Structures are given as structure tokens and as C-alpha cells.
Image: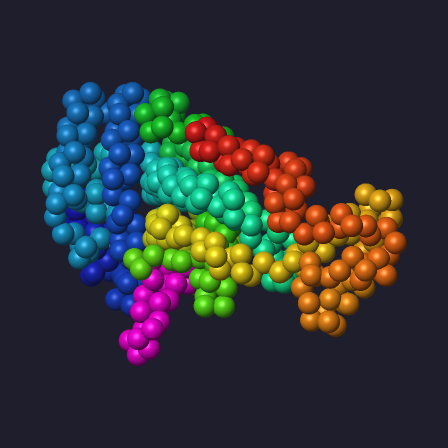
Amino acid sequence: MSSTDGPDTAGDGGALWGGRFEGGMAPEMVPLNRCLGVDGRLWRQDVRGSMAWARALGGAEVLTPEEVGRLVDGLEAVARRLATEDWSGAPEEDIHSLVERMLGEEVGELAGKLHTGRSRNDQSATDVQLWGMEAVEGLVEEVEALVLALAEWAEAGREVALPGYTHLQQGQPVRAAQWALAHAQAFLRDRRRLRFAQEAAAVLPLGSGAIAGCPFPVDREALRRELGFRAVSGNSIDAVSDRDWICDLVYAGAVAGVHLSRLGEDLVLFSSTEFGFVRMADGYSTGSSLMPQKRNPDAAELARGKSGRLAGNLQALLTLLKGLPTGYNRDLQEDKEPLFDTVDTLRLVLPAMRGAVDTATFRSERIEAALDTQLMATDLADYLVRRGVPFRESHEVVGRVVRLAEEEDRPLADLDLADFAEIHLAFEADVVEVFDWETSLESRDSRGGSSLRAVDEQLEEVRSALMA
Ligand code: ARG
């Protein structure tokens, strides 16, 4: 129905009902009710779903083949208009009403037959799910590009011994490659979560009507195939109100946000004057309007900052859904903003972080200068273990060695054999061999560890996960 056919709609923009209403919508209600500014971006999905629905009605013999043909052609014309015209100021409430009005302008009265057996409840759910399934494809590509950038950076850090931090205190030496690959692993898990959400989205709600199902014999299986869904929903009440897949996607985004934020934090720290382990390229940094020397790691900071809204979107969505009565409720219209914002935010942050990682470099001389031989205190304890000293005792012994070195203000590796021997008789001349970065790194040859073999294996696994 076009807006001129209906009752006085007084600014409610061509409402899709009217028979039982007297007078138009209250003016203060109009902007609250209207969501075209949000769901307008679903126009392609709305047209696509409508074409499939027209064909399904044809298959059910609700429409003649000739009517189906005119509707599909009309929808094609609508799509061309939507792609080229500025309709942002259209008076319609939502994208579904706008498409229907435009279709009326193309094919006349026949447009009124398209909504047979369909509700905006199953229609809007179908549109958003189609959108989400496509959006995940793009996000997965971005995540993979970031993982690849991390893997390439790791390649450059295979030979670089880096302090491994716990509590942000130097703990044990690791390889710079191992650090980069730790982030890669996290993003590979994000990819899995995104795929899971995509799978959850791929259950077709169309054909569920408003709540009870469809009274016309539409072939939902054919609809599923045409629209590229994986399955057909099994309960019409659930289908029009299921937003679990949006929770899954927004959750995947929130966790990816946490990972981006943690990578961002590492880059902020590592590119600081005090650490100086990493240099970020100019293209991903900014200067200061006042302090001429500044080079700020803004890409990393913004990645950290944007994670707040990714977490917030999940909170907004869960709060929206909690306590809703069964079936469609208008509250559900609010599902789209957190979803769109999560996808948009990730589309902003992921490419920028990928670029920042691609162009960042390790500053090995600064990293080397920061390596304190105390990082090998555990290796020293393990040395005693290999000489039969129980670990608890060797831990205690090395604690005393470290205290002595600190009292004398000497690096751990600079103590003499006499100093060691005085603390424990199991220390022998070969103790000096403990203080070798390569020996320490190579000793941890366990799967996932710091030896070159183990790191190369991790690199290979990340690369082959990208191929999968
Ligand atoms: N704009 C609505 C939404 O996104 C479409 C469904 C409207 N359904 C209704 N019964 N008012 O959820």
C-alpha cells in the first residue's frame, strides 16, 4: 500500500496497517517508531528476500507465474532505484515499508499481494540474518589478514630473544616470534567464533509468519536453497524471536575486541621510549599539536579504546533480550544497532591493526639491551635439578643467589663460581653455560615452547590454519 492509499497517516510514513486505526500516529511517536535510518542498510537483503518470497508464493499457487514475473521485475527496478536515489529522507517507518511503497510505484496494486503469508517479523529476521551471514565473510577475511601479518612479523622475530613478562616483570626469555604468534593464536580463535555465529545465523526464519507459521503451501526448503541458508527453522514462535546468533556474533566481536586491545596495549608499551622494542610506522602513528618530538601509537591506542564499545554492544543486546515474553516484541528492533556497530567497528579496527603490524619492526638492539640475566634464574634452578637437587630446594637456593647478586649490584651472570659454590655445592664450573640465551630458549622444546623447532612448528600451524 502506498502512503496515499491509506488513512490519514499524519507523518507515520505509509504505515502498513490502517484498517483498525483512526487518525494518524502521534507526532512524538513518529521518530521513536521510525528505524529506516538503521535498517535502511538492509535494502539489498530485503529485495532479495522479497524476490524469493514472490517465487515461493508462485510455487504455492498463490500468485500466477505472470504475477511472480512482474513482482520480480518490479523488485529489480526498486533495487536500481535504491542503489541510485537518495531515499534517506523517505517518510517510511522502515526498509520493508519503503520497498513495498516503491514496488507499488513500479507494479501498482499487485504489490499488495507480495506480503501474503509473510509478516515483517519473519521478513526482518530473514533480512538481518542474510546481512549477518555476509558480514561474517568480510570479517573473517580481515581477521585472517591480521593473522597473516602477525605470522610474517613472527618470521622476522625467530632469532630475537625477548623478555617474556609475567606481572609485567621479566620472567623468562621467549622468542619475539613466539610473542607475535601468541596474538595470532587468539585471532584464529576469533575466526572460529565468527564462523560459529555465521552458522547460527544460517537458519531460515522466512515462512514463519508473525508467529504461528504460514497458511499457504510455500516450499520453505526451496526458499532455504535460494537464499543460501543452511537449515529451515523448526519452530515459528522461536524463529521470529531468536536473536541468539546476534549474541554469538556480538560476543565474537567483543572477544576479538579484547584481543585487539591486548595487542594494542603490547604495541603501546613496546613502542614507548622506555621499552623501545618495537617501532611503529609513521602511517599508523600521529604527532602532537604541541610537543614536536611526539610520535604516538594511535592505531594501537584506538584498537584498545574501541574494544569498549564492542563489549558494550554485548551488554546492550543481552539486556535487551532478557525478560522478553515469548514471540516477537518491538524491542527486538533494537537488535540491529549493536550488531551493526560491532561489525562496523571491527571493519575499522582490523584493517588498521593489520597495517600497523605489517609495518612494525622489532628493534633487536633495544630488546637485547633490556634482557637481564635474571631472566635465566629458572634455568639456574633447573641446572640444580639436573644435579639431583629437588626443585623446591633449588628454587630456594637460586633465590639466595639472586639476593646476593642484588646486594652486590651485579648481574646474575657475573657472579663467580666461588659465589655459587658458597651457596650450594652442586654448582660446578659449567654453571656459566647456563647464562646463554640460545641455550635457555632451545631448552624449552615442548610443543608451543621457545625452541626454534617449536616456534617453527607454531608458525607452520598458524600458516596452515590460514590455508584451511
Ligand atoms: N522494524 C521492525 C524490526 O526491525 C520490523 C518488524 C516490525 N514488526 C512489527 N510487528 N511491528 O524488528
Left or right position of 80 against 402: left
Decide: is 376 above or below 213.
below
Left or right position of 294 against 178: left
Q: Pick the residue in front: 22 or 276.
A: 276
Q: Pick the residue in front: 385 or 229.
A: 385
Q: Position of residue 43 (x, y in %)?
A: 25, 43
Q: Pick the residue in front: 422 or 131.
A: 422
Q: Position of residue 152 (x, y in %)?
A: 42, 41
Residue at the (17%, 57%) spot, across then down: 89
Decide: is 28 above or below 435.
below
Residue at the (71%, 49%) spot, across then down: 434
Q: How many marks?
A: 0
Residue at the (43%, 29%) spot, across then down: 467
Left or right position of 17 against 337: left
Q: Position of residue 325 (x, y in %)?
A: 52, 50
Q: Which contiguous range is marked in magenta?
A: 284-302
Furthest-bottom residue in view?
290
Decide: is 9 above or below 80.
below
Q: Pick the residue in front: 254 or 338.
A: 254
